Every structure is written in structure tokens, then in C-alpha cells.
Amino acid sequence: MQVGTVKQIWRYAIKSMAGEQLKQCSVGTLGIPGDRGWALRNETTGELTNAKAFPFLMQCSARYREAPANGLVPPAEMRFPDGFTANTDQPDINQILSERLGKAVTLWPLQPADNVEHYRRRSRSARVLGRLARYGAFRAALPTITSFGKPNAELRKMFSRDPGEPIPDISILPPELVEFTSPPGTYFDAFPINILTTASLDTMKRLNPAAQWDVRRFRPNFLIETPPDIQSLVESEWCGRTLRIGTVELQCDIPTMRCGMTMHAQEGLEKDPSILRSIVKDANQNLGVYARVTEPGEVRIGDSVTLS
């Protein structure tokens, strides 16, 4: 069944910075080559970090100077809100970023999956819970465990939830995310591909017309233009089903859980807490769908998108 066509393709050279639009791309088992190829590490905590800790990153943008190829991460150019530009391979880049963010950080290209220490969360509790999360029974109990006390407070902070708002069901996330900041070998939040539809954006615009429901707030890889007769949060119904986009086959796994990064200011968009409040209230806390790649291939703007 055809559910739309590819309207936009996005690749994000540096995690949490604005990305670049592509006319076409290849897609492998780890998504679009070069997507989230770089990330920052907070040298105070020793952990990889993102715009949850440094919202300023959302106001910056990054693009590759050359196309990623052969599994290598090439240098990227970043642009700051004041127009200043810097490159990931210049000797003083860590000093520049640290001064801009007001805290010691370092910039890292993607590391091999077996370099698990690079991706590991540093708290003792994360190590303990990470081992327990390997067991299905423990993961099934996570909604109860995180419903009170310190675990609840930490999740509320992580997802920017107000008092009285629900928190996401983290039991459906990949279990390694309890122990690691991202799946080792990647800088993705959870899965290699994030998909959003125009139907969902239009639905949220109707529910909260005062807000700017701009695709850039949500950092998808593919924005799918859906037919006019689809007027709902349609991709929330795709979990467990297969999408074919161009020659690529994707397995839709879980809804895209949304956090405070959706409401932060970025170029051309003001900070707007109502964005997240609306998603929590009207979209069951989610907007978009995460997917993994079951058949690599090519995608171009205008390609048909089918659901089975």
C-alpha cells in the first residue's frame, strides 16, 4: 500500500547540530553514511553528550566538506549562530567548542563498536542496571521501577516532563541504552533511521496552531509527504510493519519518543515549550517512528513509500 513519497532527506554530520538536506542517499544497515558521524564528549562527566545538556548546539549547523564513503567519517564544517565557522579537523576545535559551550568538551568521530568504554555511561547505577537490562523480565518491570523515586526524577529531567505529565516507557528502547549513551558503534539516540510524515506535522498544527511545527525541530532522516486523505499521526500505526522507500526496506520498530530538544531555539525558530507539551498531551509523547534497515539500497527525493 502506498503511503506517500519522499519529500526531504536529512543527514546530520554532528549529533545535536542542524543537518543538511540531500537529493539522494544510500542507506546501509547503519543508516545514511555519515549520519551522526561526530559527537561531543563532556570532559567533566566523561560521557558523550548532546543538546539535552547543551541546548546551544541546536542553534549550530554542520555539513560534510566531502561525501562520506567506505565507512569513514570525513571532516565537517560547523557554523555557529553568529556566522563563525570552524572545521572538525582544525587543531583548536576542542578549545573553540569549550569556550562556546562554557564547559570542557571534546569532539569525537564515530568509534568502533568494540570500543565500548567510549560509549559507556559513567555512573555506577548505569553499569548495574545495564547488566540487569539484558534480561527481559527486568526490562518488563522498568515502567514500575521508573514510576517513583530517583529513577522517576531522572527520567523526568531527561525527557523534560512537567509534574503530572507521563514519562515514556523506556522498556521498549534497545536494552543497551541503559548502559550506553547510544548503541555502541553509532551516535544515534536509539535506531539508525527516524521517519516523520507531513500528516503528523499537519495534525499537530491543527491541535496547536500557534506553534511552529517545522520539520527541523524533529531531526528526521526522511520526511514523507502523505496523501491528503491521511490526516492523523499515521506513522504511529506503522510499528511492527515494513516500509519500502526507494530500494530500501525498513522495519518500523518503535515510536520516536520526544524530549526537550524539540522546544529549544534554533536558526529561524524560537524556543517554544508548547511544542513538547502538545506532543505529550496529544500525541502520546511521540512524533515519528524509529526504524532499522533490513535491506540496504538507495533513496531519492520523490521516491514512492509503500507499507506492508
Image: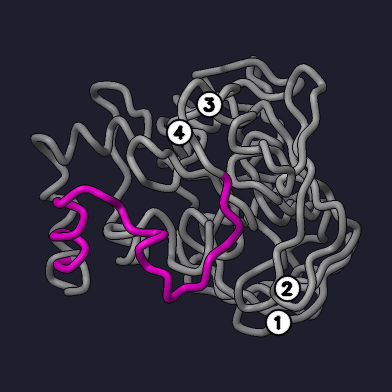
Q: Residue at x 32, y 66 (%)?
A: 176
Q: Residue 265: tell me if it is visible.
A: yes
Q: Nearer the viewer, residue 87 or 34?
A: 87
Q: Which residue is mark 4?
A: 52
Q: CA distance from mark 1 to mark 2?
A: 5 Å
Is 224 located above or below residue 19 in the figure? below
Q: Residue at x 75, y 55 (%)?
A: 224
Q: CA distance from mark 1 to mark 4?
A: 31 Å
The kind of residue tagged 3 is Pro
Farthest-out residue, bottom: 295
Q: Which residue is mark 3?
A: 55
Q: Which residue is mark 1?
A: 296
The kind of residue tagged 2 is Val
Residue 127 magenta: yes
Quick one: label 1 or label 4, which is nearer the N terminus?
Answer: 4
Q: Residue at x 41, y 60 (%)?
A: 118
Q: Which residue is mark 2?
A: 27
The kind of residue tagged 1 is Pro
The answer to whether marks 1 and 2 mark residues whose Cβ atoms lie closer than 8 Å is yes
- The quarter of the picture where the N terminus appears is bottom right
Left or right of 232? Residue 79 is right
Q: CA distance from mark 2 to mark 3?
A: 29 Å
As helix, strand or loop, the secondary structure at mark 1 comes to: loop
Q: Residues within 10 Å of mark 3 (few under 14, many from 20)?
A: some
Is 86 located above or below residue 224 in the figure? above
